[in-house]
Amino acid sequence: MSGLIDLIAEALVRVRVKRPLVHHITNFVVMNDCANITLHIGGSPVMAHDREEVEEMVSLADSLLLNIGTLSGDRIDSMVLAGRCANKKAIPVLLDPVGAGATVMRSQAAKRLLREVKISFIKGNAGEISVLAGEDAAVRGVDFAETSGDLAKVACRLAKEYNCTVIITGAVDWVSDGQSTYSVQNGHKLMSALTGTGCMAGSLVAAFAGAVEDPMLAALSGLTCFGIAAELAAKREQNPASFKTALFDEVYALNSEKIKMLARFERVS
Amino acid sequence: MSGLIDLIAEALVRVRVKRPLVHHITNFVVMNDCANITLHIGGSPVMAHDREEVEEMVSLADSLLLNIGTLSGDRIDSMVLAGRCANKKAIPVLLDPVGAGATVMRSQAAKRLLREVKISFIKGNAGEISVLAGEDAAVRGVDFAETSGDLAKVACRLAKEYNCTVIITGAVDWVSDGQSTYSVQNGHKLMSALTGTGCMAGSLVAAFAGAVEDPMLAALSGLTCFGIAAELAAKREQNPASFKTALFDEVYALNSEKIKMLARFERVS
Amino acid sequence: MSGLIDLIAEALVRVRVKRPLVHHITNFVVMNDCANITLHIGGSPVMAHDREEVEEMVSLADSLLLNIGTLSGDRIDSMVLAGRCANKKAIPVLLDPVGAGATVMRSQAAKRLLREVKISFIKGNAGEISVLAGEDAAVRGVDFAETSGDLAKVACRLAKEYNCTVIITGAVDWVSDGQSTYSVQNGHKLMSALTGTGCMAGSLVAAFAGAVEDPMLAALSGLTCFGIAAELAAKREQNPASFKTALFDEVYALNSEKIKMLARFERVS
């Protein structure tokens, strides 16, 4: 993995030099956190969701993030408009299907977006991704007690179906582009005591996708950087709000040396 | 009170075992804080407000919180839909009438919700509750300089009128179910230097209401836990932003011992 | 400047005595931060945006802040309604034209507000203000790499055009009422690693505008107080999330002595 780790370290440098503009159409719960973490990794966040301006805004952007938490009908339409415009300009699009499987509205919104927009990345937890892949999954709210084992295969199958890169976040993260599949071990269990850490992972992947060409590299970069920052934060803080502050600080303070020393992932197929 | 204190300590254990799903339809200012504090006490928050999905989402939930801050017409309709669905499934509903008395829209929204939905808990500050109880009250924005004295009676009368549990938050909290009335002394004045502490108290009560049957126990549990966490936080931090971080950490770190040592409330009628 | 510094110190006392109610119609990203920083300086924030209640709410307020981030058509209409009502009651109005120049919708919204509402303060970054002043400016998202030099003149010209006080925030802040123009040196570069610091500066100026008559004094008070707090915070914290907590704490802990010792601004014309 040492070649890939070097590429991740270079990708972080590239984000900080380019300062990719990440257009978010995201939920109200995490907007502030996602804007800040995008800034801390080195990107530039912008939030805009009205039909009237999303096409113009995404045209300025380096990547587009669509997150279906706290959804409304208007917002789905805006996401489709922005997504199609991004497609025309070859701007990568990340879909975060928050709560897919919990309600019909969210499942249908995720499927509509996958049908009408060319999605580059689907990032969800085990429940959400399983639902999109047609697996049986009991989804309750926006949480899901993930099961191990077949997640690598679920990610791979969904990646092939939509010709994209699929990311499953959890205690272990899984990434597949349909050809190769990786597991990422970086991270810390305190992340699950905070709302929106999955959404923040999406912001980081989208920031990398706005700065590097290779989707697998962007996905692994976002996940390992976030996970390493969490591990470093958890060494200093054991309670969730202090940990959150430390996590954001550590994302800002990441560098090549930390990545090279701490990145832990492996190719599983 | 020692029997009741033991029940509160057990209620906290019960929240952490059950992880009740608390469906919030709440204002934009506090969404992130309310989601995090629900997680830290041991619950699972979900935020969803579109008419199309609120009934399905609340059907999965253990309690429903309706908060009328940053209100809109659409959102009131969603609250009524969600509330009626919760009633059918016997899921407890907490109403936080933020700003009732400040504008006609908010007063009418609160009254419509009380008319069309069976509310289990009304939680507000002295001004909001006084307005709903038909008392004279000068409400300015979402603040109110509370007056002492008759608040116990106001809470009791409103509880009888709507056959529910009424909570008045402030320097001293008051809780009445129309039969018995309690005052809660736990808390710290730094809470008033932060936005949304009243809303967060609602999230905690709703989390308890999703895990224990008795409404008075749920109310006292939420208020004492929040107040104890604030007291512990204020021992470490004297400025509001640091205090906020400490407050969230202390909610997460609460346990039976701290509750038994620090809970301070009394029955006043 | 010593006379003016004394007036700023007195203005802070006045905010804390009066507790001005600052009605915000602002974007979803910064609502929580703007509410908290308004509380910490000594004001009282309220957020309300529905057409049905904005006129009633602003009638209770001491100042009105209109921020066009995360805009929608409905919200512009509400801003116009609230703004006109504020004008009738002589309540000062601050406009924050977030992203003007990035999309046609935002530029037009800012211009409509300037046309239909008497604005007391326009506060933006170099790109946004340049766009409103008819200067060439490349605006990308909500960021802008500011150029020095003519900003004082741009501020002065726009202030004359709309007979208001114009504030340009950046590494150096510029304030002009068309008659006199000041630069403010207080501040720290870590502010740019956080989302919404410009919006927060708006909240502080609006809080002062709700407590003192003189617009130039309100503007200089808000900017120097925020900048001094940032400098004190940066002495303790070098990473952005810890810095943010320290910044909020320092706003709360500001006093006359700190202002008199640390305020740095000068009249440039």
Image (spheres, coloured by chain):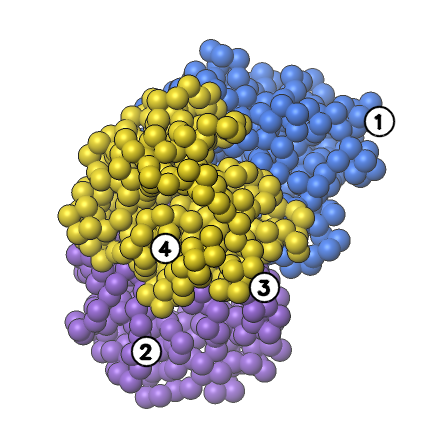
Chain colours: A blue, B purple, C yellow
**Amino acid carrying mark 2 in the image:** Ser
> CA–CA distance between discs 4 and 1?
56 Å
Q: Which of B46 and B265 is in front in this view?
A: B265
Q: Which mark is residue B176?
A: 2
Please name the residue shown 36% across and 64% down the image.
Answer: C14
Q: C153 or B186, which is in the foreground? A: C153
Q: Quadrant of residue A107?
A: top left
Residue density around tag 3, few if under 14, some if 14–19, many if 20 or more, within 10 Å:
many
Q: Name the residue under label 4.
A: C208
Quarter location, residue B143:
bottom left
Residue located at (46% from left, 73% from top): B189
Tell me the number on the disc at residue C245: none
**Nearest-to-viewer mark from 4 and 1:** 4
Q: Name the residue under label 1.
A: A2
Chain bearing tag 3 is B
At x 25%, y 63%, the residue is B140
Element type at marker 1? helix
> Could you tell me which secondary element the residue under label 2 belongs to?
strand
